Amino acid sequence: MTQAQATQELELVGDPRKDGRWRCLLEGSSSALCEQKLLFDDDPFGLERRIPKLPARIDFESFLLRLEGGEVLDGLRNIVSDDAWFVDRVLPQKDGPADLLRCDLRSGMRLEDGAIRFVPRPVDRIDAEIGLAVSNEPSNWGSYLCRILPKIIRFGEMGLDRILAYCGGPQRLDLFDLIGLSRERIVPHDPGRNYTCASALYMSEPTNSLYLEPSARADLARLADRFRAWSGRRLYVSRRAGLGARSGRTCLNEQALESELRALGVEIIHPDQLNVRQQITAFANASLIIGCSGAGMFNTVFAPRDAVVIEIESSPNWSYAHTSLFSSLGLRHGFVWGLPVSGHGSAPHVPFEVDVAAVCNRVKDYA
């Protein structure tokens, strides 16, 4: 790709399977029966917020492409050629460039006057065949578990000697050990750099709005099965330590909630302070999981299918995705809405309070 080509306007390709510029090794269109096991939807503050109802079936569009040297991996997941670009999912018509690049802050893609142009970043050349286990928000633990870990598992099963994947933090490195991948096979992905590859495999995201494909769900369940002892732990997933404590979306009376939950025999855990084995063990042996929405609650991918999840939801922004995830896992789940601090409008990352009694009453119902 020359500098002149790099700065020209690029076409966003919504479905790379149907475009002859890339070799599609596998493609599929499937659907899964969706059973949304929503137990309750409580808004004790009377703001009439509701968890969305999911459709009866969830559709999946999947692909595995071979890229043969003429493309650049940019940012989190963008595949850029001389005149086009695409990402790791088949796009509905409503999704445009601005939607896809909103969280991709280190990408060289630029939206200028309604057109996408590409400003190259420093380039790493990879000559060996490699699997690109990349997707949106790799630094978010929940996104990593749902979007990227299933790709790493699948590329490992395919026997690829090299897999490009985000490696931030010891927890991700420990995951490679748990799934039997030598760390020498992992090439760390830096979203601030560009990558060119002699031959690369590029796989679609294994979710639809975080509703996991059945194969991805099965991969994660097999990992969790190695840690199950059926101890029936009752967990509260605290955000008062680690990344949750530094987020703008803090529960102002979480300490009071934890005190009441302890009195009910609930165990308080801080996932950021646990290694991967401890996290999987805790969730794989839980019968009840309570927590404010956040990355720690995505460890429910390791929970038994008969577990109950009670999530405290502070904003409607991600409520569809959260009930999608729990439904894809077959988990019975319910929501208690918190009260955002006034003056922030509809912004998602704002402090909030929770009705402690409302949460505890639901815990008593399912303890």
Image (cartoon, grey):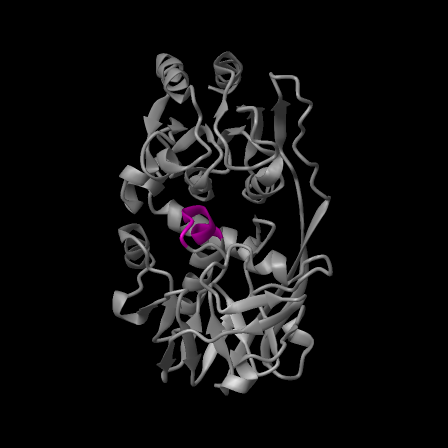
Position of residue 343 measured from the top left corner of the image (x, y, whole percent): 57, 27
Q: Quadrant of residue 23?
A: bottom right
Q: Is residue 362 visible?
A: yes
Q: Does residue 350 sit above or below 149 in this rendering?
A: above
Q: Would residue 94 appear left or right of 305 to someone viewing this image? A: right
Position of residue 261 measured from the top left corner of the image (x, y, whole percent): 39, 17
Residue at the spot x=66%, y=72% of the render? 13
Residue at the spot x=47%, y=54% of the render? 137
Residue found at the very far front of the displayed protein: 113
Residue at the spot x=56%, y=67% of the render? 110
Q: In this rendered view, identify the residue nearer to me: 155 or 257.
A: 257
Q: Quadrant of residue 121?
A: bottom left
Q: Does residue 104 sit above or below 274 in this rendering?
A: below
Position of residue 95 measured from the top left corner of the image (x, y, whole percent): 67, 58
Q: Quadrant of residue 82?
A: bottom right
Q: Is residue 323 visible?
A: no
Q: Which residues make up the magenta segment? A: 139-146
Q: Would residue 23 appear left or right of 241 to someone viewing this image? A: right
Position of residue 40 measured from the top left corner of the image (x, y, whole percent): 62, 24
Residue at the spot x=38%, y=70% of the render? 163
Q: Would residue 350 appear left or right of 91 to someone viewing this image? A: left
Principal secondary structure, stretch drawn in magenta: helix
